[in-house]
Image (cartoon, rainbow, N blue to C red):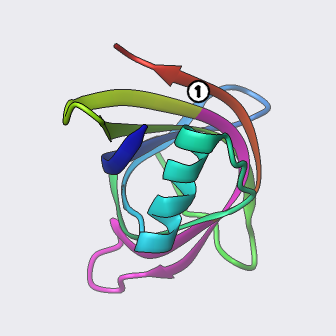
């Protein structure tokens, strides 16, 4: 059983070409973190996730974030650390197909995405990297 998740990043790829698009750091609000823990602990699937304060770490040249008006279908690999019963942090990768849309970009720092939503999530894999 896992009790806490931390250090979330996501690598996003184009579903048609497999080309890398962007890597983001993510902050899940409490309820979204619970969704991830319920999935890891009990297999409860989810179809959407909302993250705050995302930061672009690495992007393909010419990257333009998807918007509410122009969402993009993508493939994502969510990387996180999950704390187990012993207190150890286990690296976990969750592969998924999703629709991405940025709800708000900080106008003073375009690398800072204040809110990003992933919908129509289809979970494809879970890898515990021990």
- Rendering quarter of residue 30: bottom left
**Residue shown at 39% from the left, 17% from the top:** 129
At 33% across and 65% down in the image, what residue appears? Answer: 111
How many numbered badges does the structure rendering display?
Answer: 1
Magenta-colored span: 95-117
Q: Quadrant of the N terminus?
A: top left
In this picture, residue 45 sits left or right of residue 21? right
At which x and y percent is residue 85? 29, 35
From this viewpoint, which residue is outermost toward the left? 87
Task: Give the labeled residue for mark 1.
Answer: 126
Q: Is residue 122 above or below residue 68?
A: above
Q: Is residue 43 visible?
A: yes
- Mark 1 element type: strand
Residue that sits furthest to the top in the current view: 130
* Residue 97 pos. (x, y %): 73, 41
Can residue 114 be found in the magenta stretch? yes
Residue at horizontal 50%, vertical 72%? 31
- Is residue 11 rendered to the left or right of residue 27? right
Comparing 14 with 77, the one in front is 77
Query: Up-down: is 17 above or below 68?
Result: above
The C terminus sits in image quarter: top left
Q: Quadrant of residue 128?
A: top left
Q: Is residue 67 magenta?
A: no
- The residue at 35%/72% (across/down) is 110
Q: Main secondary structure of the magenta part?
A: strand
Image position, residue 38 (x, y; %): 57, 51
């Amino acid at each position: 059983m896992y009790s806490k998740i931390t250090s979330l990043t996501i690598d996003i790829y184009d579903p048609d070409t497999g080309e890398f698009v962007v890597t983001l750091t993510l902050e899940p609000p409490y309820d979204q973190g619970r969704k991830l823990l319920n999935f890891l602990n009990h297999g409860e699937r989810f179809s959407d996730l909302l993250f705050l304060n995302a930061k672009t770490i690495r992007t393909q040249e010419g990257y333009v974030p998807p918007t509410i008006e122009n969402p993009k279908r993508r493939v994502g690999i969510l990387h996180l650390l999950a704390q187990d019963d012993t207190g150890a942090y286990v690296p976990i990768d969750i592969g998924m197909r999703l629709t991405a849309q940025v709800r708000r970009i900080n106008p003073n720092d375009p690398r800072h995405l204040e809110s990003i939503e992933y919908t129509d999530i289809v979970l494809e894999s879970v890898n515990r990297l021990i």
